[in-house]
Image: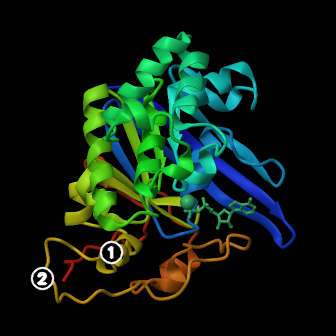
């Protein structure tokens, strides 16, 4: 099976007053056809910058992609001109992005229908009548009631959950090969979150697309993702099939994340233990493992050796830890 998207050794740096921030530091990952892949990590670990880099949406300045490749349909997206025709075609139709804040991505002065129709006419060459019909179908598909009339509503007439549904409809409108959803439901209440994630999973299956799901919630990963990448301080520190990562986490950071989140498979009174300490300052990353100051398993080897790279610890499972700890999660 060949991947839909394959990112190799991506590196993105922001030049700031306090120094160079290496937000993405040698990140490689891939998404296969029909796969739902999770990217998880605490806030500030580089999840969003990674995705925005692949789409060439990093504000420059202060940001710059300093290296790497992003292969999609036989082409390296990072070789395209940032705002050239090819890159715009990718962003408009082939890979769609769904963000956390629909209000900032929806245009307040256009109706939901006008915004859907605009994309359909521009990228699918539909007539006004065709686009109007399709817009209603799309709204129905994402569960908006009375789509024939709601299609004429403005974004402020929709509730938060409905706006996010509209964003999903927009993301699906051009039948993309890949959907990148960056914390798509984080701003919503838990019930609406679950409904929308379920909806996205069903649409991915039905429409034969793939989904890269960025989240800081491991519960969401456990439920929806086939594979997962764990990010820390701009790097991937563990990757593997979701089941494998949950049953047998091999990076202390992943172990920490698992202990800090509520689990459906454990008794309710199970105590949640937050990971102590704070993520590192990305301006002055140490030469050794960036997790060492917070790591309960750190040894002298960890402080004297360069930061470890990913090493295989199982089939499709890799971790970037000198110790590759094994631990029962009790
Ligand atoms: P995540 O999505 O995992 O929460 P981000 O990818 O948004 O994290 O950010 C990673 C790091 O990149 C942040 O900690 C921040 O320091 C840096 N960063 C992001 N955007 C900018 C920017 N416009 N200017 C400077 N630094 C930035
Ligand atoms: Mg983010």
Q: Looking at the image, which is closer to me, 258 or 187?
A: 187
> 154 or 191, which lies in front?
154
User: Do tag 1 and tag 2 residues touch (Cβ < 8 Å)?
Assistant: no
Ligand 2 visible in quadrant: bottom right
The image quadrant of residue 9 is top right
The residue that appears at 16% across and 84% down in the rendered structure is 268
Is disc 1 placed on a helix, strand or loop?
Answer: helix
Up the image or down, 217 lies above or below 256; here it is above
Quarter of the image with the C terminus in it: bottom left
1 or 2: mark nearer the eye: 2
In the shown orientation, is residue 59 left or right of residue 89? right
Residue 174 in sight: yes
The label shown at residue 255 is 1
The residue lying at 48 percent from left, 42 percent from top is 167
* The quarter of the displayed image where residue 15 is located: bottom right
The answer to whether residue 321 is left or right of residue 288 is left
- Quadrant of the snapshot with the N terminus: top left
Residue 267's tag is 2
1 or 2: tag closer to the N-terminus: 1
Position of residue 33 measured from the top left corner of the image (x, y, whole percent): 34, 29
Farthest residue to the right: give it.
17
Q: Secondary structure at mark 2?
A: loop
Q: Residue at x 14, y 77 (%)?
A: 266
Q: CA distance from mark 1 to mark 2?
A: 18 Å
Q: Which percent across, then down, holds residue 306?
A: 58, 68
């Amino acid at each position: 099976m060949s991947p839909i998207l394959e990112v190799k050794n991506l590196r993105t740096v922001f030049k700031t007053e306090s120094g160079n921030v290496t937000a993405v530091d040698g990140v490689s990952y891939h998404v296969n056809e029909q796969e739902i892949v999770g990217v998880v990590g605490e806030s500030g670990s580089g999840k969003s910058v990674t995705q925005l880099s692949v789409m060439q949406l990093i504000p420059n300045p202060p940001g710059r992609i300093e290296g790497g490749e992003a292969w999609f349909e036989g082409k390296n997206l990072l070789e395209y001109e940032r705002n050239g025709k090819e890159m715009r075609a990718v962003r408009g139709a082939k890979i769609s992005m769904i963000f956390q804040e629909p209000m900032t991505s929806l245009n307040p002065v256009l109706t939901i229908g006008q915004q859907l129709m605009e994309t359909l006419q521009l990228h699918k060459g539909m007539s006004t009548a065709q686009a109007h019909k399709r817009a209603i179908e799309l709204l129905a598909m994402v569960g908006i009631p009375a789509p024939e009339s709601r299609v004429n509503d403005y974004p402020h007439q929709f509730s938060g959950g409905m706006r996010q549904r509209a964003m999903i409809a927009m993301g699906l409108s051009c039948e993309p090969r890949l959907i990148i959803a960056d914390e798509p439901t984080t701003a919503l209440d838990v019930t609406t979150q679950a409904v929308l994630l379920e909806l996205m999973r069903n649409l991915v299956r039905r429409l034969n697309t793939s989904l890269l799901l960025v989240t800081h919630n491991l519960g969401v990963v456990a439920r929806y993702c086939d594979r997962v990448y764990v990010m820390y301080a701009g790097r991937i520190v563990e990757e593997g099939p979701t089941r494998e990562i949950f049953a047998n986490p091999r990076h202390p950071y992943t172990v920490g994340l698992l202990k800090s989140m509520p689990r459906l498979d454990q008794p309710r009174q199970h105590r949640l233990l937050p990971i102590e300490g704070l993520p590192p300052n990305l301006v002055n990353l140490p030469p050794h493992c960036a997790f060492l100051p917070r790591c309960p398993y750190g040894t002298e080897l960890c402080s004297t050796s360069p930061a470890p790279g990913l090493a295989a610890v199982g089939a499709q499972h890799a971790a970037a830890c000198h110790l590759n700890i094994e631990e029962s999660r009790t």
